[in-house]
Amino acid sequence: MNVKAPVETTDIRVQRKRHWQIDEVTIQVMVMSSLLVMVVLLTGWYDPNFFSAFSIRSVLRDTATWSLFALGQAVVIISGGIDLSVGSLMCFLGVFALLLLGPIPWPLSLVLGPGPLPLLGIIPLVILLAISVGVWHGQLVCRLGLQPFLVTLCSLLTLRGLARVITHDKTVSFSAKEVPLLHELGSGAWLGIPVPVYILIAVMFPLGLFMHGTVSGRYLYAIGYNVEAARFSGVRVNLLRTVSYMICGFLTALAALLEAGDVKSVPPSSAGMAYEMYGITGAVLGGCALRGGQGSLIGVVIGMGILRVIKSAVVFLGISTYWTFTVTGVVLLAAVIADSVIRRRKMG
């Protein structure tokens, strides 16, 4: 008696095939990781000074700081939005924090007193202000139905203008001897590793748990993938999209404090300039689709690492720094084209 092996149905075969397939985000992260290694090796091969302890610490410090606001940008993009105000918000928050370290100017002194305030009191104020900006963005986008691009573009201009107004367009600075903790947070190191790296790791774990281990986090992906389907499924779309902007504001506040602590000054006319483009580029390089619905947090950090190493490579290769923005623009365009090609192949 012959016994035939059970025939797999088409659905089972498709499911098994999909189980062994690598999704496009993972592929992009793997490609970007390879690109990062290649750029690092090529730069170090051309100029061994790139591998000096000072250079490596500088790259790690900047990558960690930039990754914080880029992760916030990524969360917004995953949910189907965008935040163009990140750079101006960093500038405004940095100015705000340093102003509170000294005699507080009018009209802030009417609310906060003559000052100065202790750093441990300033940090929660800066974070609260950043989260409030995120709530404001979320309400304008969700309640009034305004385009995220236009809402955050207006904030980009408004926050930059406010930073220049309250400082009379003068650079605000502080003394590392008077506020050692802030300087240590921005430029200090422990066991040879910059402090911002530890802060980034401390942020990555809860953020990753929220995005992948909670229902609300997974809903953000669903909202970005198809907002109407998510709404019809009972997802609280407005609340969660507002939360994404709040997360972006919170992470931008951390980045602002770290950068201000590292540089020890904040020029209101140039601080954070084009950082929103860095955040978007890093997010896209890390696998975030500008259409929303997909992205990798680890990929974002790798993407920001690529941008930071490219910035160093321009210097070590003897290329004029004027080319930095050009190279960044070309990299962003290449990432957008690759994302479009992948989407068309997937749909086809």
Image (cartoon, rainbow, N blue to C red):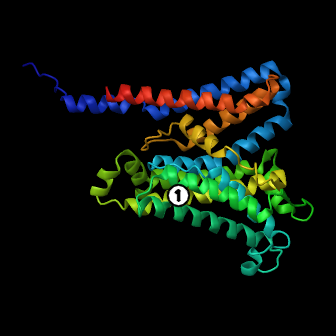
Q: Is residue 311 left or right of residue 181?
A: left
Image coordinates of residue 84 in percent, x first then y, are: 58, 49
Residue 93 seen in the figure? no
Quarter of the image for the N terminus: give it: top left
Total tally of numbered discs in the picture: 1
Q: Could you say which is closer to the camera, residue 232 or residue 5?
A: 232
Residue situated in front as seen by the camera: 124 or 88:
88
Q: For this view, does 326 lie left or right of residue 48? A: left
Measuring from the top left, give residue 154's x and y in whole percent: 57, 55
Identify the residue position indicated by label 1 in the image. Answer: 245
The answer to whether residue 270 of the structure is visible from this angle is yes
Q: Position of residue 235 (x, y in %)?
A: 34, 59
The disc labelled 1 sits on which kind of residue? Tyr
Depth check: give the residue in front, 106 or 328.
106
Q: Is residue 345 above or below residue 200?
A: above
**Label 1: few (<14), some (14–19) or many (≥20) C-alpha neighbours in 10 Å:** many
User: Which residue extends farthest right?
Assistant: 177
Q: Residue at x 61, y 36 (%)?
A: 303
Percent position of residue 335, x then y: 54, 30
Give SS at disc 1: helix
Residue displayed at 80% across by 62% down: 168
Please identify the quadrant where the C terminus is shown: top left
Q: Residue at x 84, y 56 (%)?
A: 171
